[in-house]
Amino acid sequence: MLDFGAVSIEWKTVIFQLFAFILFPTLLLAGFIGIILNRSRSKRRTIEELEKRIEALENEQKRPKQ
């Protein structure tokens, strides 16, 4: 227990406040940032795969037909 004269705070309250007001929003923000980065990597990977397929099709189209 923390004692501030007329006001005292129990450790459970301090731990709850630490978790609720500092750790939880920080973890939530980190999770959202992780989700956004993962989606952007997925989109980038998909775009690169599509570009490779387009390049392969263009090269196939340029080859002389026999």
Image: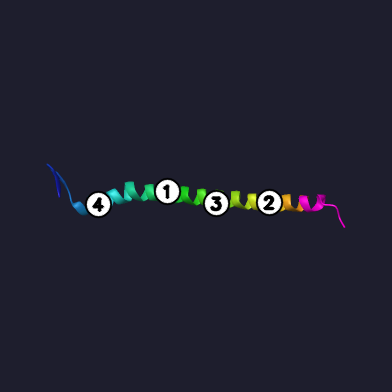
Residue plotted at (38% across, 50% down): 27
Q: Amino acid at mark 1?
A: Ala
**Residue 58, labelled with which disc?**
none
Q: Could you say which is closer to the camera, residue 57 or residue 21?
A: 57
Q: Amino acid at mark 2?
A: Lys
Residue that mark 1 sits on:
30
Residue that mark 3 sits on:
39
The secondary structure type at the circle numbered 3 is helix
**Mark 3 and mark 2: Cα distance apart in space:** 20 Å
Upstream in sequence: badge 3 or badge 2: 3
Upstream in sequence: badge 1 or badge 2: 1
For discs 4 and 2, the disc positioned in front in the rendered view = 2
Q: Are marks 4 and 3 in contact (CB under 8 Å)?
A: no
Upstream in sequence: badge 3 or badge 1: 1
For discs 1 and 4, the disc positioned in front in the rendered view = 1
Upstream in sequence: badge 1 or badge 4: 4
**Mark 4 and mark 2: Cα distance apart in space:** 53 Å
Q: Where are the magenta residues, as a range?
A: 59-66
Q: Could you say which is closer to the camera, residue 8 or residue 25?
A: 25
Q: Amino acid at mark 4?
A: Ile
Residue that mark 2 sits on:
52
Residue that mark 4 sits on:
15
> Dot 2, crowdedness within 10 Å: few (<14), some or many (≥20)?
few
Q: Amino acid at mark 3?
A: Arg
Q: Is residue 47 magenta?
A: no
**Mark 4 and mark 3: Cα distance apart in space:** 34 Å
Q: Are marks 3 and 1 in contact (CB under 8 Å)?
A: no
Upstream in sequence: badge 4 or badge 3: 4
For discs 4 and 3, the disc positioned in front in the rendered view = 3
Q: Residue furthest right?
A: 66
Q: Are marks 4 and 2 in contact (CB under 8 Å)?
A: no
**Mark 1 and mark 4: Cα distance apart in space:** 21 Å
